[in-house]
Image (cartoon, rainbow, N blue to C red):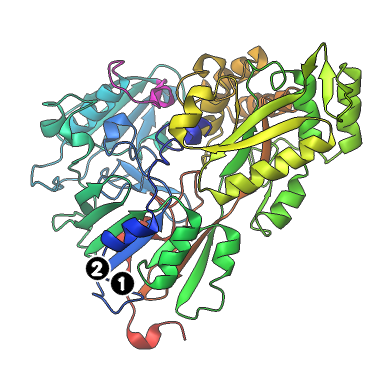
Amino acid sequence: MTARSIRRAAAAILTGALALTTAACSNPGPTAGGSGGPKDSVVVGIAYEPETLSPLLGYGKDGNSKIFDGLLAFDADMRLRPALAVELPRIGDGGLTYTYTLRKGVTFSDGVPFTAKDVVHTYRTILDPRTNNPSRTELDALGSVEATGDHTVVFRLKYPYAPFAERTVHAIAPEHITAKQDVNTGPFTSRPIGTGPYVLTGWSRGEKLGFTANPRYWGGAPAVKKFTMAIIKDDDVRATRLRAGDLDGAILPPALAASFKGDKAKKTWTAKTFDYRTVTLPTHHPVAGDTAVRRALDLAVDRQAMVDKILEGAGKPAYGPVPTDSPWFAKGTERRHDLAGAERILDEAGWKPGPDGIRVRNGVRAAFPLWYLSGDKLRQDHALAYASDAKKAGIDITTQAGTWEVIEPRMKTDAVLAGGGSPGDPDFDQYLLLKSTLGGDGFNNMAWYDNRTVDRALEDGRRTNDPAKRRAAYDTVQRELAKNPGYTFLTHIDHLYVVNDGWDGLSTQTEPHDHGLASGPWWNVESWKPKSPGERKK
C-alpha cells in the first residue's frame, strides 16, 4: 500500500487468510444475528490483521482501536470530541503549544489509574528512534511533551502544525506496563492493556481477535459483551461465512455485497472514504520510471470504466490521493481517458511499436510486472483492467498475485496495485506517500517517488497554519503529480458492509484505507443496543 495507508500498519497488515477448512475447526461461535445465539455477542469478518496491538508501534494511531482511547476521538461526522481529555485542547503561543486537561477517575482495564504520565510516556516512546514505529514522521512537529500534574499535559511543537489536534486521537499506552518491557518485542505487543471499551481475550494470528466488554470502561459498560473479529482475507470466503450465519457482518466488494440484496435479515451500509487504489510506478525501473511512460499510462487508463464495471458505481475516479469531492482537491488536475494522447506521448519519447505491438526504445521493451495481493478481488480486477488499458497503448504489463512477504522485497523495481488514503488533513497521506526521503521506508513512498518541487511543497504544507499557504502547497503537489505521475491513481472506493439487522446504533464515518479493523459500522460497537424481535427488518 501507499502512505498512511500504505504504511505497514495499514496496508501491509493483510497477512492471514482464514480458509474454509480452518473456519470449520475454529468457528468464532454462535452470533446474535443469524444463528439464534446469545444476543450480547457480535462476530464480524474483516480482511486486515494488524502486525501489532501496541500503540507505541502504530496500532490505534487513527483512533477506534477498541482496546485503547486517545486524548480525543472522532464522532460520526469526523469532528473532534473529547475522550481521555475532558475538552478540546487550549492552543497558545501562535499554535506552538497544546494543553490538554485529562479526565479523572479513568483506569486501565487492570485497575491502575490513568494519568498524565501515561500520555507523556506514549508520545516520548514513539519519538524515540529505537522504537520501530513506521509512522514516526507523522509527529515530526512535536518537540516535547510534559505533564504538569496528574491531569494536565502540554505539547510543545517545533513549528506550527495545523492538524496536530487530529494526531492526538492516538491510542494511549500504560506506562506502568510498557516501561518495563522491550517496546518492540515485549508481550504487550500481542497482549495489550488499555482504557478502551473492550479487553482483548485472545489473538489467534490469521484467524481472529476476541474481545470482551471492559467492566471498568469510563464511558459505561457496552451492551455488546463479546466482540469477535474473524480475519478472513479472501472475499469469497467472507461472503460464504456471512451467508452461512457464522458472521453477523462483513466488509465485502460491491459484487458480493449485491448478492445479499434480497436478504431481508441483513442491511448494507455504505461508507464514504478516502481509500484509493493506485499502481506504483517504481522510479528505479527503466520503463515504469520513465516520465513519458508514466504520463501515457495516466491517459491510457479508463478510470470511469473501472468505477462502473469493477466498483459497480460504488466509488469515483481518482487522480491523486485527494478525492475529487474534497475541499483540498486541486481543480483542473483531472486526467481524461485519451488513448490517442497516450500514444502520441510515447511516439514523441521514442517508444515505437515493435512487431508484436509492444513498444521498444533503445532495445528496451515497454514491459514490467504488476503485483497484487492474493485473494483481494478488487485489486485483482483493477490490476487486470489496468494491464488491458496499457496493452492498447503498447505497454505490456504482466499481472502477478502474491502475499506481502513476496511483494515487499520487490517494490523498489516492480509495480504494485496498492491502496491508501486518510481522511482529514492532506498532510496525513501525501507526506508518507510522496516524500523522497521515505522511499524504501517500509510501505511509505512505495514508488520511491523523487520530486524536489513536491518535497518542498510537502514541507511548506505541514509547517504553517496559514490556510492560503497550505492550499497553495497542496495544489502544487497535485499539479506536479499530473506532470510526472509516479503512481497511476485509479479509483476512490466506497466501503460496503453487510450486517445482520439485529442492532440499533449503527452508523458509518468517512473512512481511511484500512477498513473493517477500526472502521465499518462497528466503529462504535460499544454503543450498539440489541433490537427487539419486532424491530428487526422484515
Tell me the tag on residue 223. Answer: 2
Residue that numbered label 1 is attached to: 529
Left or right: where does residue 467 sit relative to residue 147? right
- Residue 9: where, in percent of width, then height? 39, 35
Determine the image quadrant of residue 333: top right
Residue at 27% x, 43% y is 85
Residue at 41% x, 20% y is 140
Residue segment shown in magenta:
128-141
Q: Secondary structure at mark 1?
A: strand
Residue type at mark 1 is Lys
Residue type at mark 2 is Ala
Left or right: where does residue 113 sit relative to residue 332? left
Q: Secondary structure at mark 2?
A: loop
| Residue 129 painted magenta | yes
- Residue 374: where, in percent of width, then height? 51, 43
Neighbor class of circle 2 (other Cα within 10 Å; few <14, some 14-19, many 20+) is: some
Residue at 25% x, 23% y is 125
Callouts 1 and 2 close, C-beta under 8 Å: yes
Name which of mark 1 and mark 2 comes first in the sequence.
2
Residue at 29% x, 58% y is 228
- Residue 457: where, in percent of width, then height? 62, 19
Q: Which residue is nearer to you in this view: 227 or 143?
A: 227
Left or right: where does residue 180 sit relative to residue 237? left
Total labels: the figure holds: 2
